[in-house]
Amino acid sequence: MKLIFVSGGVISGLGKGITASSIGRLLKARGLKVSAIKIDPYLNIDAGTMNPFEHGEVYVLNDGGEVDLDLGNYERFMDLELGSDHSITTGKIYKSVIENERHGEYLGKTVQIIPHITDEIKRRIANVARDSGADVVIIELGGTVGDIESMPFLEAARQLGRDLGRGENIMFVHTTLIPIMGSVGEEKTKPTQHSVKELMGMGIGPDIIIGRCSRSLTQTAKAKIAMFCDVDEKAVISTPDARSIYEVPLILESQGVADYIIDRMKLKPLTTKRNMKDWESFLNNILEPKKTVTIALVGKYTALADSYLSQLEALTHTGAKRSCKPAVKFIDSDDLLHNEPASLLSDVDGILVPGGFGIRGVEGKIAAAQYARENGIPFLGVCLGFQIATVEISRHVLGLEEANSTEFDPETPDPVISLMHEQENIEDMGATMRLGAQTVMVAKGSKANDLYGKTVISERHRHRYEVNPNYIQRLEEAGWKFTGKSDDGRRMEIGELEGHPYFVASQFHPEFRSRPMNPSPLHLGLIDAAIRFKDDKTGTQ
Ligand code: GLN
């Protein structure tokens, strides 16, 4: 088992997840099998009950795990499919230790953080390393070194270094901030020195230091960090502000990080060449797109872009495929209540209504869907966006004026979206939705069939409500065709509006499976339709 721990110092939000993902990508590009774990030191069992405003979106895995968005970065950068065991939280660790204690597993003993909590952390890491069969597992430690919550995890990491051997089997990568004072000032290394000192106080001297700075670090700064923090000079890596997160692997590669790791850990890559050609052309399409379309993202968490991270990445992937920049215009759905939709939407080439929970913002989203439908603007609805589209069509095409989802109006005379049967008696909020990858049957000849290129697909879910079967026939007669259904035919999964250039919505979340080289088909459909829409508008051939 070979492990690379990635910790963070000085401040949070340094892009540790992107750094960890990028290192993984580089190792993978040399033919090594990589996997990744995210440690979140909070007490929640998982991210499922958290507000996107605090931690960004809740990312969903194939097995239904509701996890931190960094697992999305790992899946996208390293092209992996991970399971819930790749997300470790303090909540999960304590829960198992306390359950073990109640079962009498530690009879006679005092249960303590060391060794019981640290052993449980080590056990979980070892299980993932074994089950994934990876040559190397990258483990990102959430939070900042010095936080009370992360101490047991650092201690477990230190012990693993001792158990398995530092250098060859365990490496520590520490990411820090190197501020610059004044516009032409020098790089300040003191915060880095202090945070490394903190790490050393836990018995961990880093092997690699990655310094985030607004510009590239000078050789003098690198030498100073190497000297004060006791690392090789070539192990001090500079990550200046990048033009795209997808540039970071190439920035790291140019400084030889992967070679340094391979050498130190005695990894046996299949190739010594950097097989990053496809990545480079992907990045080039992002940085130098041949065209631009404007996509409105209508949501209620728009003040924090991370709340819709996977949607934005899916648009980036599909845009790159078409060498088209999707310029995203964030629209707070409540603004559509106080303004004419045209005043906010008349300049966009496509509208995306993503997932969401709770009544706030819903009517504004319905207004956006109506505007898209009536004006022939390309529209993609995802999860709540699918339910919204169904409500909009029920109200304004079928004439069921008070149609709604029972999530927002339990007394509605026309509950076109209603609670799934199996959800009716559920009281616990954590991990109780319809979650994870499920098979969807796609109708032959539909747009979805065209885009996916097949009739049986698997996509990830996270919802409690669904299209009420009593309304399916009427909705289809009105032109809202359900071209994707669950394999038993009972649940509606994809809707496509007849006679509209692209008005498509899905109950599942295609954004979670979008990959740089293999973008989400429904987002690709949106971008293609937006390109056509814009060309028609401007008269371009
Ligand atoms: N609130 C809706 C439901 O639970 C939609 C969920 C979502 O958009 N993820 O069904």
Image (cartoon, rainbow, N blue to C red):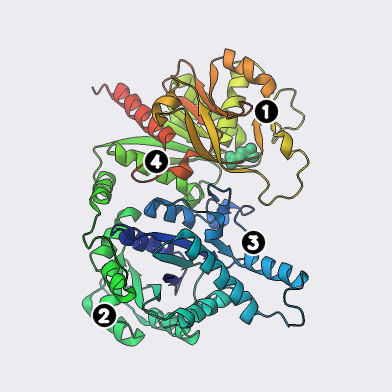
Q: Secondary structure at mark 3?
A: loop
Q: Position of residue 443 (x, y in %)?
A: 49, 22
Q: Is residue 465 left or right of residue 248?
A: right
Q: Helix, strand or loop at disc 2?
A: helix
Provide the residue designation for mark 3. Answer: 44
Q: Position of residue 407 (x, y in %)?
A: 69, 36
Total marks drawn?
A: 4
| Few, some or many residues within 10 Å of mark 1 (<14, 14–19, 20+) | many
Among the two numbered marks 2 and 1 on one chain, the one whose residue lies closer to the N terminus: 2
Circle 2 residue: 233
Disc 1 to disc 4, C-alpha distance: 29 Å
Q: Is residue 179 visible?
A: no
Label 3 CB, ligand 1: below 8 Å? no
How far apart are the two marked residues, 2 and 4, measured between alpha carbons? 39 Å
| Circle 1/circle 4 CB separation < 8 Å | no
Distance between the Cα atoms at labels 1 and 3?
33 Å
- Judge left or right: residue 515 versus residue 55: left
Q: Which residue is mark 4?
A: 315
Q: Is residue 347 above or below residue 287?
A: above
Which corner quadrant of the figure contains ligand 1? top right
Mark carried by residue 404: 1
Query: Spatial distance from mark 3 to mark 2, Cα to Cα?
Result: 39 Å
Structural crowding at the residue carrying mark 3, measured as other residues with C-alpha within 10 Å and reported as few (<14), some (14–19) or many (≥20): some
| Marks 2/1: CA–CA distance | 62 Å
> What is the secondary structure assignment of the residue under circle 1?
strand
Can you say which quadrant of the picture contains the N terminus?
bottom left
Q: Nearer the viewer, mark 2 or mark 4?
A: 2
